[in-house]
Amino acid sequence: MKLTLIFTMILALSACSTYNAPDSPLLNASAVWVIMPLQNNSSTPLAAEKAEQILSSQLYRKGINAVIYPKTPLKSLTDILDQTSKYKHAEAWLATYPADYIITGSVQEWHYKNGLDAEPAVGLTLEIKNAANNQTLWRASGSRVGWGRESVSGAGIVVVETLVNGLNFAPAATTE
């Protein structure tokens, strides 16, 4: 009976998250990493910017000091909702920046679900490209529905952390 109960609980808890996060090829942690604007496909304004900041902190935890594209000033609600100028500004900046790896992606969900408990729901995709030839080196996606008292950012941290844990880094060269 105990074993059945434990198995049922594990199944119930694992159903709240879905990840497709393959291991990456060996990447150089000391290379120049750039986080470009994530596309916001969610219904929440500025969700992509929140995910970018979480991504930056999770990469830093892994020893990668990624540079985030320079922000464009938001002058109106149109600037927030229409992201075309942000992408154009970031692409123009990237053309002048000596990046080795480019991180892009999209946010599919970033909100609280409707209902009594209003659980947070987060879904996103990340992609790492070689800046020299624009070849995709790694792509992963994940989603999670948190518990009723959890914040959306807390659920976002778990998703980004799980995805970033799929990155493999080449050992640092030693000088002797």
Image (cartoon, rainbow, N blue to C red):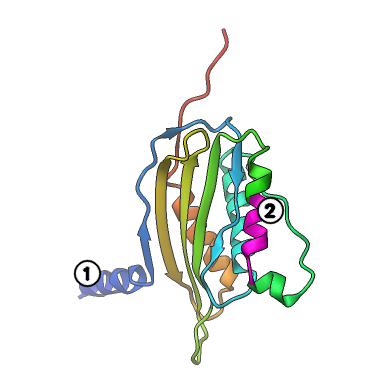
Relative horizontal placement of residue 24, taking residue 106 as reference (left or right): left
Going 45% across and 53% down the picture, which residue do you hit?
163
Left of 105 or right of it: where is 79? right
Which of the numbered marks, if any, corresponds to residue 45?
A: none
How many numbered badges does the structure rendering display? 2
Residue sticking out furthest to the top: 176
Query: Is there any visible trace of residue 91 in the rendered image?
Result: yes
Q: Quadrant of the N terminus?
A: bottom left
Residue 70 position within the rendered picture, expressed as x and y whole percent measured from the top left: 72, 51
Circle 1 residue: 3
Marks 1 and 2, Cα distance to the nearest angstrom? Answer: 56 Å
Q: What residue would you read off at disc 2?
A: 89
Range of residues picked out in magenta: 82-90
SS for callout 1? helix
Give the quarter of the figure containing the C terminus.
Answer: top right
Residue at the image position 62 percent from the left and 57 percent from the top? 87
> In the rendering, at what x and y percent does residue 67 appear?
66, 43
Residue 14 image point, x, y percent: 34, 68
Residue type at mark 2: give it: His
- Note whether 50 is above or below 42 in the view shown: above
Main SS type for the magenta part?
helix
- Residue 132 locus on image (x, y percent): 51, 33
